[in-house]
Image: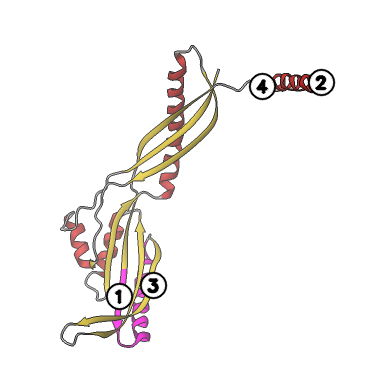
Amino acid sequence: MKTTTWVLIAILAVIGYTYITPDTPRTVSTTGECLTTAPRDRTAITLRVTTLDKNALQSMRMATQQMAAINAYLATLDVKTQTTEFNSYEKTEWNHTTQKSVNLGTETTIAVEVSADNMDVIEQVLNEFAGQPNIYVGNLQMFTSAETLKPIMEKCLGDAVQNARERATALVNGDKRSVGKMLSVSYGNATYDAPTANYRLMAAKAVAETMDSGAGAFGTLASKDTNVSVKVSATFEIN
């Protein structure tokens, strides 16, 4: 009797559970994509001061004084600056004649990245410091600022979601159904810059001359737009 009662309770429980559990919605999952471009609105360059002296304190003093002069000049221009390097270390060199390491002194390096929304300003900076001792430049490049990229990326994201919905609609149309609300979505994005001139360390004067000619042994400073790619994975309800 007890066994029969428990079996009946179990059956009723299953029936009750089935009754109160809502139907699982039918869904369709698709991907969507968006490809667009963003204008490169800023130009940047790195100015690097490198000094060498037998006296460590003198080496650091020389570097900081020269960088202070650079920063004083940059303060008069419409540029953004950021210190990217500051180090000082004992520099040695292997002497092949004596077959031993020779202490050359203390080398101090201070670098600052300078960016502007006008390439002419960067060229002005290069011309200002061309030929000065201990000053080198690197990473001359054009890029898209975060302020410009943000709204373009957000619009592209919306276009990618719409693309995913259109694909989902095409999939369910054959079953005479329509796509409802979006239940979930995930996304990834990327930006791809076409190659620009990535100059090795060289005298500022050499870079200035390269910019005047528009090309050089190290490449051409391109102004092509930044490529933007957004891809989403979305799940929609089927009506």
Q: Say which mark, if any, is on residue 86.
A: 3
Badge 4 or badge 3: first in the primary sequence: 4
Snapshot quadrant of residue 93:
bottom left
Q: CA distance from mark 3 to mark 2?
A: 82 Å
Badge 3 or badge 2: first in the primary sequence: 2
The type of residue carrying mark 1 is Thr
Instruction: Tell me the SS state at disc 1.
Output: strand
Magenta stretch: give its range.
Answer: 48-77
Q: Say which mark, if any, is on residue 22.
A: 4
Q: Say which mark, if any, is on residue 13.
A: none
**Horizontal relation, residue 54 to residue 182: left or right:** left
> Depth-wise, is mark 2 or mark 4 nearer the camera?
2
The type of residue carrying mark 2 is Thr
Q: Locate the C terminus by quadrant.
A: top right
Q: Locate the N terminus by quadrant.
A: top right
Badge 3 or badge 1: first in the primary sequence: 1
Q: Which residue is mark 1?
A: 50
Instruction: Tell me the SS state at disc 4.
Output: loop
**Residue 45 lies in magenta, yes or no?**
no
Above-or-below relation of 62 to 24: below
Badge 2 or badge 1: first in the primary sequence: 2
Is label 3 in contact with label 2 (beta carbons under 8 Å)? no
> Depth-wise, is mark 3 or mark 2 nearer the camera?
2
Snapshot quadrant of residue 192:
top left
Q: Residues within 10 Å of mark 3 (few under 14, many from 20)?
A: some
The type of residue carrying mark 3 is Phe
Q: CA distance from mark 1 to mark 4?
A: 72 Å
